[in-house]
Amino acid sequence: MTVLTKNLKKQLTKRFGARVKFDEPMAQHTSWKVGGPADALVFAADVLEVADLIEILSAADTEWFVMGGGTNLLVKDSGIRAVVICLQQGLDHIEITERNDDGVLVEAGAGARLNSLCRYAAMQDLAGMQFAVGIPGSVGGAVLMNAGTGQKSMESVLKEIDVLNSSGNIISLGTDRLNFKYRALSWENSMGRACHGASVVIAARLLLVPAHGKDLEAQYEAILARRGKTQPRGLSAGCVFKNPSSEMPAGRLIQEAGLKGMEIGGARISEIHANFIITGHKAKASDILKLMEAVRQKVRQRFDVVLEPEVKIVGE
Ligand SMILES: Cc1cc2nc3c(=O)[nH]c(=O)nc-3n(C[C@H](O)[C@H](O)[C@H](O)COP(=O)(O)OP(=O)(O)OC[C@H]3O[C@@H](n4cnc5c(N)ncnc54)[C@H](O)[C@@H]3O)c2cc1C
């Protein structure tokens, strides 16, 4: 049940019109196509809107959560008791901001698609984004997740991000203030505390290097072909668990535990890549959660290794 007051609903409708949806089923906005309703989902078109929204929500003492493409999110079946800020329909500029001896700085809005950024780079004859080709979702999501592959991640190109904090201020953070980890990024706030929960990434600046666009396109095609062969096509959120180490990928542990093809309700462990859970049209978030728990138990029993989720689990 929604916790939003009538007054807050009125305010949000007045400010965002048709771009605010109340009791919005999150299944329509996540790549797994599961998840109950968010109290409200707001599609913010620009920084000013995000700032206004956060101000309104802070004044109303209402919680919020920011999402990009929903390609790494598991929203539970009872939904999210907060306002979800979605950046997938705005903040999507991509442009060259500087050329220097080190290379070319490209700025991308957090709502831009990561794959659009890869295409833009190739069109501008710029290398560096090859690792990201085929990773769905937004630039903001990729920054927050330090998305990538076994070889490289966003850390390899990211130079600076702009963040809107809960006080409505935009701060630019260079790599000296960013703490990259495997599939995670955090930074220190002005109080010296590690944070990102109460901040919205609004733009990223990446350092790319000159190359031949045609060569890059050929590399992209090869990478996509490899992804096509090694990853399933069904509804998923990519790899469900983090790899305990590069020598011990989670997929191999799950496969060797004999779990490929295991099903609970509408969720199934992929036959093609054991670290992917694929959902059918009747799947529930609880099916995925039960399957994840079963996998964790079996892998722990068999290998004495505890798998940690890579996907972000939200809601109730
Ligand atoms: C088929 C498939 C293949 C995939 N392959 C890969 C892969 O090879 N490598 C890989 O790393 N991932 C992969 N993924 C997972 C996923 O695509 C990435 O993690 C992606 O970067 C998530 O981006 P998103 O915009 O969808 O983020 P979301 O799923 O919307 O959000 C993910 C997290 O980021 C936060 N967030 C999103 N935007 C912002 C913002 N602007 N400011 C602050 N916080 C924000 C959210 O709160 C959440 O915690 C794959 C997923 C699928 C479905």
Image: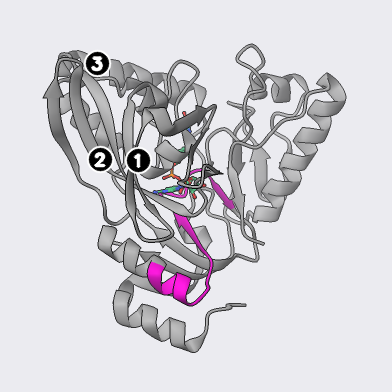
Counting residues from the start of the chain, the first of labels 2 and 3 encountered is: 2
Q: Which quadrant is the C terminus positioned in?
A: bottom right
Residue at disc 1, CB closer than 8 Å to ligand 1: yes
CB atoms of marks 1 and 3 within 8 Å: no
Task: Look at label 2 and name its amino acid.
Answer: Ala
Picture residue at 83% right of the left edge, 22% below the top: 304
Q: In terms of secondary structure, where does tag 3 sit? A: helix
Which label was assigned to residue 108? 2
Instruction: Look at the image and say whether residue 56 sits in the magenta stretch.
Output: yes
Which residue in the structure is indicated by mark 1?
139
Q: Do the residues labelled 1 and 2 touch (CB within 8 Å)?
A: yes
Disc 1 or disc 3, which is closer to the eye? 1
Residue 168 sits above or below residue 273 on the image? below
Residue at 38% x, 28% y is 175
User: Tag 3: Cα neighbours inside 10 Å, few (<14), some, or many (≥20)?
Assistant: few
Give coordinates of residue 39: x percent, y percent.
53, 72
